[in-house]
Image: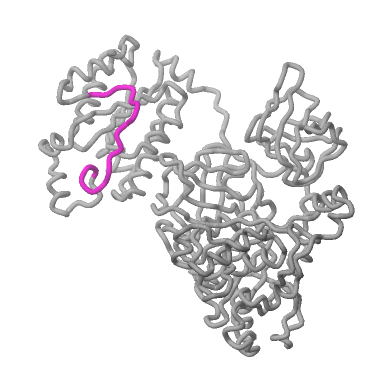
Amino acid sequence: MPETDLIASDVIYQTEALIAEDIEAYLDLHQHKSMLRFITCGSVDDGKSTLIGRLLYDSKMIFEDQLAALENDSKKVGTQGGEIDFALLVDGLAAEREQGITIDVAYRFFSTEKRKFIVADCPGHEQYTRNMVTGASTADLAVILIDARKGVLTQTRRHSYLCHLIGIRHIVLAVNKMDLIGYDQARYDAIVADYSAFAASIGIEAFTAMPISGFKGDNITGLSPNTPWYSGPTLMGHLEAVDVNTAAEAAGAFRMPVQWVNRPNLDFRGFSGLISNGTVKPGDAVRVLPSGKTSTVTRIVTLDGDLEEAVAGQSVTLCLADEIDCSRGDVLAASDAPPQVADQFEANLVWMADEPLVPGRAYWLKLASQTVSVTVSQPKCTINVNTMERLAAKTLELNAIGLAEITTDRPIVFEPYTESRTLGGFILIDKISNATVAAGMLNFSLRRAQNVHWQALDVTREAHARMKGQSPAVLWFTGLSGSGKSTIANLVEKKLHALGKHTFLLDGDNVRHGLNKDLGFTEADRIENIRRVGEVARLMTDAGLIVLTAFISPFRAERDMVRALLPEGEFFEIFVDTPLEEAERRDVKGLYKKARSGALKNFTGIDSPYEVPEEPEIRVDTMGESPEEAAERIVALIIGDWMPVI
């Protein structure tokens, strides 16, 4: 760091004496400093970026060339007249500088003699709430800024609620821009009282309030003479002293999600991961979850050699005494205090996608190193951040905060988010776009998931199939309305029946007269329609039947969901490919005419999309192949004689 006589808030830029005296001692001291991750958040233009710029400036983390560039940029695009605009140290995007706002999360590192810091500057606009959630997900402390001129705003409440929901227990209420209200104590006290009432209503038990000016430097590194009525800590002093309670993680029961099975040669097999909680030593008994198998730790291996003990926060490779099945996604835990395993949960969700939640649709859920398929039920409610009122909702829109039940396709290892961020926090990913659509926090497993178990049956699905002399299968006919799905499916079943095969045909219209008569034609109802049919088809294959289904089933995700329900090789996707113009010309049921007139909403091909199968087992071109010919070809496939035409 260069030596200079530049003064910032009475702090002189000078080289620390220890660097000149003993560089190795200085580096060792710096390496063992504790780390605090914190965020700045609040409403638009509350001064978040300016505050971080001031912290970087006052902590002597700016080099001479950076300072010169800052001065030049402040004259060109700054918002502080001829003075230094500290926000430009953080706002790097051209759009941010043009508008004077923060859009993306900006991470900055700085350090003082007592501690190292990583700060995330989070945007204040409501449309960028998802960016704020990203920044808050790893933070230990939140600095919530309030413009002293404006007081507590909607985004102040939203960000405070999200910080509390995400598990940040150290809150600093920084009433900023005190210089613009003449350091009025009465105004400051009124803002703190207003925020206190709101904080208590959402469960924030304590916070530290302070009057500051990020631009002028009041109460940032030293107490300001402009606020003689304030005797609390400075912002930097509080950040250096706050206890982030890392000892609590080390004191908990041992947990390590397995990220990688380390097998460099035939003589070594270890399980690598980051210890999220507790400590582990050679000789400790551990349990592999979800399987429940137990073993004993024989070695703790690192790049620098074996350890006698490893603690939370360390990445290690553990060797076990027994050759037990353990792979990525499993969790190694203390044998006598394992986490829970379940497949149904209540969870808080923060929706982060422009497209709304589709209840019943399958998403990917990533929790620690586990990745599973999950469906989300219709939300129980959404939260109004102004009133904390719980409102009924059918879906979740962008930036909505809701409560819902979720179901995974197989049991996962978890702990409530209040007990473990690692095993309680997750993200949802759209299976088609691979975009992250939500962040979630598990509250608890549903009691029915603990009380409902698979019943072992003596007569297996294999026994049912042997009795019928056939291999069970699902022939899933999909295509536009009027494409000829039902006609071809009916012909196929007649031919299979004539061959002595045991079949059952589930037709879309027929099912809606009974099993699914309570469902409409919204996207969510269509997904639930297919889910129910898929479950029924699976049960029928358990009975050894060949099941034929004729449904539009417009979405790939739901067809893939049904495929995943069945053993490999039992699901046959049959795409009845008919151009929309031809299907509409046929219009046997008059549905296209109604849809064109507006009398029938959410009709596939008109105002609701149809996602064409990418790799169907069979494609039927109804413009070049008759229903009879198509049926013959499909039957040949089922009895094993059909070969694809190349």
Q: Position of residue 348 (x, y in %)?
A: 55, 56
In depth, the one of 341 and 6 nearer the eye is: 6
Q: Quadrant of the N terminus?
A: bottom right
Q: Is residue 79 left or right of residue 173?
A: left
Quarter of the image where the C terminus is located: top left
Residues shaded magenta: 604-620
Residue 472 lies, with reference to residue 483, above or below; the image says above
Residue 289 vs residue 373: left or right? right
On screen, residue 621 above or below 132: above
In the figure, 460 relative to 149: above or below? above
Q: Is residue 161 magenta?
A: no
How many marks do you count on the picture? 0
Q: Position of residue 538 (x, y in %)?
A: 42, 30
Is residue 386 visible in the rendered structure shown here?
A: no
Q: Is residue 617 magenta?
A: yes
Q: Main secondary structure of the magenta part?
A: loop
Which is nearer the eye, 466 or 216? 216
Q: Is residue 554 left or right of residue 340?
A: left
